[in-house]
Amino acid sequence: MAADVAAPPLSAPPPTAGRLRIRWRFLSLGTRMWLGLGLIALVLVFAIAVPLASPANPDALNPIAAMLPPSWAHPFGTDQYGRDLFLRAAYAARLDLMFGTVPVVASAILGGTLGLLAGYLGGWTETVVMRLVDVMVAFPYLVLVIVIIAILGPGVNGMMIAIVIVDWTVYARLVRGEVLVVRRLDYVTAGRLLGFGPGRIMLRHVLPNVITPALVYSMVDVVNTILVAASLSFLGLGVQPPTPEWGAMIADGQNFIFQAWWMTVMPGIALVATGVGLSLVADGLAEVIEGG
Amino acid sequence: MQNLRYGVRRLAQLVPTLILVTLSVFVLSHLAPGNPARIILGQHAYPAAMRQLERELGLNVPLWQQYLLFVWHAVHLNLGISYTYRTPVGPIIGQHIGVTVYLVVLSIALTFVLSLAVAVASAVRVDGLVDHVVRVAAMVMFAMPPFWIGIMLILLLAVDVPLLPVEGFGGSAGSDLYHLVLPVLTVSAGLIVIIVRPLRAKIVQILSTDFVDAARARGLSPSRIVWRHVVPNALISTVTLLALNLGYLLGGTVIVENVFGLPGLGQLLVQSVEARDYPVVEGLALFFALAVIAVNFLADIAYTLLDPRVSLE
């Protein structure tokens, strides 16, 4: 954010007024990046190590241990079937991290390619791609995803495909916008004069110069997509029981909100920790790359 | 006069979008599995009855004619017949619309006031305490899905201390408002987080303009500068940001209605998807898209009216 630097405070600070002029060093770029990476590492260790360390089946029922509050034996407590929520949250982490990566990579590749083609080739390609984008943008994001899930059928695959069908449009717009600027530049003209084909120019000369905003956005998109996937599973349109997923676990816990607060709080904390970690790194990278 | 001409031209630009949106909902309705006539009549329908219903539904004519028929029906609010309710889709949507509108309007009002206040407070002293608290809070809350925010509010305000109702709607206006407190807080929390950062940047920019410098040079008090010069200029940005994020807001209401058991369009949408009631799903898709298009159109018009500097070209 360039504006942060440029703006003077409204009332010019008297030289002696130091109380509110403390520099918040603990929030410096480096601190935030390390905090974010630390949180991500923690979630990764949680997702990888806990299922490895515990041989138990996360879906196995154990009615004797139903709805136990958090303790050393069950750090996140247990649910109404006596399943250990710590173990289930760890299995859920694997699934949710996949939701944050697979649809995002697919959307970025699909949208990036179409945006590159639309921006560089122009003409019919551009009209078709951008009209498609216009249609998608007219619908509320989540509503469109839900409507597509209605047709594909609820479940992990239907949900991921639906997300990609809607999400690629952002990348197409970002990349096309950059290509429109870059394609007028001298080095592209030079490439054309040297007799390079459009494929070579697009991949070797245009793409490396237009990809940055899309990459920056993809980091934020990871957080968005995890939250969307968790929301859809919460609504019962994504991951189906008994497979553990944070949103689905929270939906399950809402039925017992008066008896067992840990059933909603604990999976939510895992979800928020993941989101905050990824946001910290995403913001930090954006700041570094955009020079803000 | 100039405004009117701008409005008409802007209205004309909507035509291709409307065609594409209706076309895409039409395509969706054909991608939905199953023959509508068979779903309505059941597995053991007489072939003659099937053919007659197919004729009534217009399924026996070429696709382009079906599309024109679809648009013609949509214009007359005829959106087909629900598979589960066995009644026309239009009135079903009509019954659920009130709660959603109520929720959306109250959330927009709360978001408008709070995000403007928070953004001004943090922009006035860049890198001050408030600014940092807001930045950290916005980032943490950005990672909280609306449904979890809602449930945490229930835990804090309705379970231990039963201040507010957890779910339900319907009854007197007072009781409805009471039932909407937590849902409105939840929707607004998500929206404020999205809006407050760009709004803060905008206000920081306004604070560094010449007219603010001029006001400061004339010796106006900081509070007067903020209230009389900065806030009015920031209002326009707030309206624009709210309109841009309407899709996000509507997505939020879909989730929040399901958390709090509010019988609005979002709950209807999720229930219809689960029941595979495709006509209702398609009707809602069309309705939501038209609402977004209409609001963006109105925001564009409002923008030109609020800010005389906006060029009408």
Image (cartoon, coloured by chain):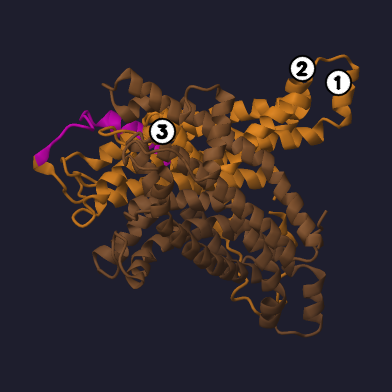
- Chain A shade: orange
* Total tally of numbered discs in the picture: 3
- Residue kind at label 1, given as amino acid type: Gly
Question: Cβ–Cβ below 8 Å for labels 2 and 1?
Answer: yes
- At a point 75% along the width and 84% down the height, the residue shown is B220
> Where residue B278 sits: x, y (%)?
40, 34
Residue at mark 2: chain: A
Q: CA distance from mark 2 to mark 3?
A: 41 Å
Q: Position of residue A4 (x, y in %)?
A: 69, 60
Residue labelled with disc 3 = A150
Residue B97 at least partly seen: yes
Instruction: Determine which residue is flagged by label 1.
Output: A191
Residue sitting nearer the eye, B312 or A8: B312
First reached walking from the N terminus: tag 1 or tag 3: 3
Circle 2 is placed at which residue position?
A200
Question: Label 3 sits on what residue type?
Answer: Ala
Q: Please provide the residue range marked out in magenta.
A: A41-63
Q: Say if labels 2 and 3 share a chain.
A: yes
Asked whether the viewer can see residue A140, the reply is no
- Horizontal side of residue A285 vs A236, given as left or right: right
